[in-house]
Image (cartoon, rainbow, N blue to C red):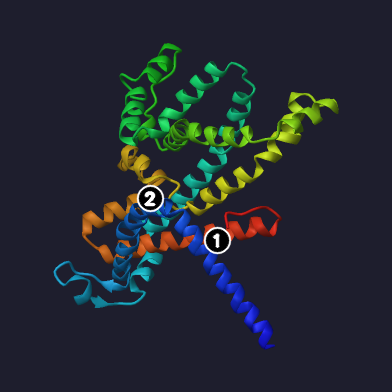
Amino acid sequence: MQQGHLSKQQLRHRRRMIRRRNMRRNWDVYLMALPGLAFLIVFSYLPMYGIVIAFQKYRIAQGILGSRWVGLANFERLTYSFEFKRAFRNTLIISVMKMILGMPVPIIFSLLLNELNNKYYKSTIQTIVYIPHFISWVVISGIFIDLLSPSTGMVNMLIQALGGEPIYFMASPKWIRPTIYFTDIWKEFGWGTIIYLAAITGVDPQLYEAASIDGAGRFRQTIHVTLPAIRNTFVVLLIMRLGNIMSGANFEQIFMMYSPPVYEQIDIIPTYIYRVSFDTLDFSYTSAAGLFSSVIGSIMLVSSNALIRKLGGRGMY
């Protein structure tokens, strides 16, 4: 028994020595990581102390330490708020629809792009579809507001030239959600395309050769070789999308494109929090709404990862 106990101690000691040796060997890597770690602590973890105001009747003059504690009263108010329920429903609908409509696009496009043999043409297409990801929603929303303008927009000019009536895309309850979905896919599918192309590049060429010898054409090779090879990449991206289900509706996009006529269709939790915070200065209530949204997102992330691992897939952790 004593000998077994000593062997465990020796094993722990050996692991500590290996970790220390790796840290000494890769000290420059750890040093490079310190600024990022410091940034994360200062701007992500320390501000989490402010979560306590969700359980208070917060007053700016009294501060966090002086404000009265009210427990779960702010969360109870959420359950009675029609506008919060509407924002919660819109957040789920828009996030899920973006995921359903948006995730297949980069997969299909990367598979098609992978078939190109001309490297220069291929890299040019990659760059073109990749650039919108880095453009601010402020710029993109301005572009689409001009393009979809009912009086001077190119889209409505084309519709009128074909004999149709101009459509108020940005103020129409019928058209605002399709507009949100389309602009989001247009902006982000290039980013997903690059990720899937990187995964496809890592596929062993011998697998394609073996499939070709067995008589499989390009389509069957794609179905039986390429798609299974990028499954883990798809799973990771799916888990990330599910984990961001409460923020996937994208505050910046909605905030730049919505207006009072379409609050019913696209007012989401982040925009609702923004409006209520500055209209009423009720920061306790809006902090409760934000904390509720974060908790739901965390539950979705953990649950989706656990479900995928249970089904035999590889999760994120």
Q: Looking at the image, which residue sits at the far left?
A: 61
Q: Image point 60% across, 43% down: which residue?
A: 233
Residue 288 quadrant = bottom left
Is residue 82 in sight in this rendering?
A: yes
Q: Amino acid at mark 2?
A: Met
Q: Image point 43% across, 51% down: which residue?
A: 29
Along the line of sight, the residue nearer the viewer: 262 or 143: 143
Q: Position of residue 40 (x, y in %)?
A: 35, 56
Cα gap from disc 1 to disc 2, whole angstroms: 30 Å
Along the line of sight, the residue nearer the viewer: 224 or 250: 224
Q: Is residue 131 above or below residue 53?
A: above
Q: Residues within 10 Å of mark 2 (few under 14, many from 20)?
A: few
The residue beneath circle 2 is 32
Residue 215's tag is none
The residue beneath circle 1 is 302
212 vs 291, left or right, is: right
Residue 71 quadrant = bottom left
Q: Amino acid at mark 1?
A: Val
Q: Image point 37% across, 25% down: which residue?
A: 148
Question: In the rendered image, which quarter contains the C terminus?
Answer: bottom right
Q: Looking at the image, which residue sits at the far top?
A: 161
- Asked if the residue at tag 2 contacts the one at tag 1, i.e. Cβ–Cβ closer than 8 Å, the answer is no
Is residue 297 in sight in this rendering?
A: no
Q: Is residue 217 above or below residue 202?
A: above
Q: Position of residue 293 (x, y in %)?
A: 42, 59
Secondary structure of residue under mark 1? helix
Along the line of sight, the residue nearer the viewer: 75 or 306: 306
Question: Mark 1 or mark 2: which is in front?
Answer: 2
